[in-house]
Image: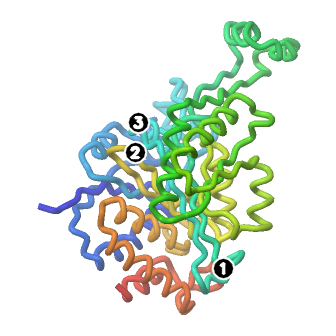
């Protein structure tokens, strides 16, 4: 009986391509695991009005973790238009399956390492090694939204905050509201995770990235909680910065920063910026981590125009595999994989198109596997 059961979720687009490449590496590593396919993605939205079928949720509940490729997402009207005819006009609303996974399994921590590997021609600067901790279940991704704006919502908000009155001149069908919801528990959990990581890996600072001078309550809660948590880690400095300034400082002085922690939307934004500093989304791995379940994925999208061509850079997926191995406790295996990835990048003999080469995703996988 295999030691691990891993939910295998290719999704669609290039998610299938990079997962095929990852399988070459996992086979070479001889990880003692059973890979169980799960249905997820755009095809299941079109045919079932559910991009994350319940059978896949059940699968994940009965596996150790999941490896995920990529999925296609489209806005509300475009999504409904692609449903099969018998499902149209029945009030089906598309919701991102990865967001649902994060909430369904309380994958509260989104961990995104961004590391510049020597020899990568796309590095902004060598030596960058930033880890972003993004709160993964709250904030603007909570899904509490209104359009048109119901009268009772308008009146309730206005009762508690007079600033709402300035929107009275706008009719309900011209007002959309999305609630930014942060909890003290959510803030404390993600900030504690960031400090624990800094402690474990001897990192000297944690930077909380928010906007409390304008978004006073939700960002203010995050910053106040960070100050409380920081008292438990006297050997680690707490730095505070606004999200807009952080983007500027990362471009100017990326080597100054080590661990960043922030809320869901700001984390989504700043982690993409950090990814570009080390070569782009082709190098951007991530882990969605809960107390019992974890889902590992590259942060790039499905890039439908490249689907099936084995063209895109699979390094982000390989590094996501490394994160999965670490989470499973197979750290020696994970270290060997990262070393092989770094060697392939440094040698520069095998490169995908984004790195100035012409090799395929599968050829990158074979090059990495050849060093294991």
Q: Residue at x 41, y 73 (%)?
A: 21
Which marked residue is nearer to the observer: mark 3 or mark 1? Answer: 1
Q: Is residue 66 above or below residue 355?
A: above
Q: How far apart, in angstroms, are the residues tagged by discs 3 and 1?
A: 38 Å
Labels 3 and 2 touching (C-beta < 8 A): no
Task: In the rendered structure, find residue 126 and report the number of the disc placed on it.
Answer: 1
Tell me which numbered mark, 3 or 2, is placed earlier along the sequence. Answer: 3
Q: Is residue 309 visible?
A: no
Quadrant of residue 183 within the rendered picture:
top right
Residue contact at pointers 2 and 1, CB within 8 angstroms: no
Find disc 3 in the rendering and name its residue. 104
First in sequence: mark 3 vs mark 1: 3
| Earlier residue among tags 2 and 1 | 1
Q: Which mark is residue 290?
A: 2
Q: Secondary structure at mark 2?
A: loop
Residue at position x 64%, y 51% from top?
238
Q: Residues within 10 Å of mark 1 (few under 14, many from 20)?
A: some
- In the rendered image, which quarter contains the C terminus? bottom left
**201, 139: nearer the viewer:** 201
In percent of width and height, residue 312 lies at 55, 72
């Amino acid at each position: 009986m295999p030691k691990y059961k891993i939910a295998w979720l290719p999704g669609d687009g290039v998610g299938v391509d990079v997962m095929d490449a990852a399988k070459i590496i996992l086979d070479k590593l001889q990880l003692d695991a059973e890979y169980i396919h799960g249905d997820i993605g755009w095809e299941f939205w079109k045919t079932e009005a559910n991009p994350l079928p319940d059978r896949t949720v059940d699968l994940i509940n009965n596996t150790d973790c999941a490896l995920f490729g990529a999925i296609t997402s489209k806005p509300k009207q475009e999504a409904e238009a692609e449903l099969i005819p018998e499902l149209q006009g029945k009030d089906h609303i598309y919701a991102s399956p990865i967001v649902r996974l994060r909430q369904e399994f309380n994958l509260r921590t989104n961990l995104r390492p961004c590391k510049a590997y020597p020899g990568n021609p796309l590095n902004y600067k060598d030596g960058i090694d930033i880890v972003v901790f993004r709160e993964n279940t709250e904030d603007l991704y909570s899904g509490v939204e209104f359009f048109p704006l119901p009268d009772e919502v308008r009146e309730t908000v206005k009762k508690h905050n007079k600033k709402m009155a300035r929107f009275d001149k706008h009719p309900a069908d011209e007002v959309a509201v999305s609630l930014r919801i942060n909890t003290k528990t959510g803030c404390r959990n993600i900030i504690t995770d960031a400090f624990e990581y800094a402690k474990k890996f001897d990192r000297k600072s944690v930077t909380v990235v928010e906007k409390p001078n304008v978004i006073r309550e939700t960002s203010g809660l995050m910053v106040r909680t960070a100050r409380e948590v920081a008292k438990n880690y006297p050997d680690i400095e707490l730095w505070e910065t606004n999200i807009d300034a952080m983007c500027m400082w990362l471009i100017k002085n990326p080597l100054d920063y080590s661990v960043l922690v922030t809320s869901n939307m700001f984390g989504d934004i700043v982690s993409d910026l950090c990814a570009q500093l080390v070569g782009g989304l082709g190098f951007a791995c991530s882990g969605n981590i809960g107390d019992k379940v974890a889902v590992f994925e590259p942060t790039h999208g499905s890039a439908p125009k490249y689907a099936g061509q084995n063209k895109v850079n699979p390094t982000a997926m390989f590094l996501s595999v490394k994160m999965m191995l670490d989470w499973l406790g197979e750290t020696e295996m994970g270290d060997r994989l990262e070393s092989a990835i770094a060697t392939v990048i440094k040698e520069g003999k095998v490169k995908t198109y984004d790195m100035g080469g012409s090799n395929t995703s599968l050829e990158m996988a074979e090059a990495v596997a050849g060093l294991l």
